[in-house]
Image: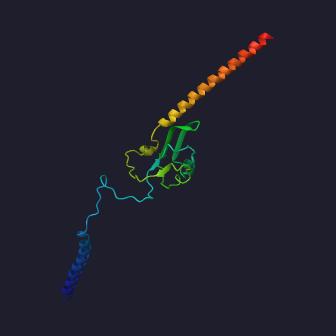
Amino acid sequence: MVRANRYFQDVWDTLKSTVVGMRITGKYLLRKPITVQYPDERLPIPDRYRGIHYLEQEKCIDCLACARACPIDCIEMDAIRHGKELEWVSFTLDYQKCMFCELCVYPCPKDCIHMGTEFALVVEDRSELKFDLLSFQGMSPDARVRKREAEEKKKVKDAEKAAKAAEKAATENGDGAKS
């Protein structure tokens, strides 16, 4: 008799736990699925998400504030100044080191480096995680035109100075010959 009571108690406990589990499953059974087909669809990303950096290269003045603020030195910048114009050589960010702390964004005086919403850093080789953030190498087309114009003005001024110096030398030689 004791064995029969124990058997029925076990059957009752099994049915009870099955009904509780099926109740939880039943709640989700009739709901709309929330599966996202990742590469084709994406969930909305919050505004303050810290993803892959992007650089507004035209605004950047190569002040190195972002590189100095980076606690792990993953930002490397190199540019050549031509007066007020910059000729970019490189602006790389090493995502093997980067901890996405956003400390490089705040000290920028021109607000030209930002944290983006892109998050896919899928590569086959870790050496590919060193990204060049420049949208163009060298100088922008507008900066090239301004630099060319400045160089032409400088050549004209130098030619004028040379002409004046030659005229002055000729005048001095002419005055010296009269004496």
Q: Quadrant of residue 161?
A: top right
Q: What's the colour scheme?
A: rainbow
- Between residue 3 and residue 98, name the one nearer to us: 98
* Res. 147 image quadrant: top right
Is 166 placed left or right of 74 in the picture?
right
Count of numbered badges drawn on the protein: 0
Q: Residue furthest bottom?
A: 1
Please tell me which residue is depicted at 57% across the width and 46% down the height of the picture.
Answer: 64
* Residue 126 visible, this orientation: yes
User: On screen, 164 above or below 121?
Assistant: above
- Vertical arrangement, residue 15 with respect to residue 72, above or below: below
Vertical order, 22 against 1 (above or below): above
Q: Position of residue 131 (x, y in %)?
A: 45, 44
Q: Which quarter shows the N terminus?
A: bottom left
Q: Residue at x 78, y 10 (%)?
A: 178
Place of residue 85 in the rendered image (x, y in percent of width and height, measured from the top left): 55, 37
Q: Quadrant of residue 172?
A: top right
Q: Is residue 95 visible?
A: no
Q: Quadrant of the C terminus?
A: top right
Residue 56 percent location from the top left of the image: 48, 46
Query: Residue 29: x percent and y percent?
Result: 23, 69
* Side of 23 where 46 appears, left or right: right
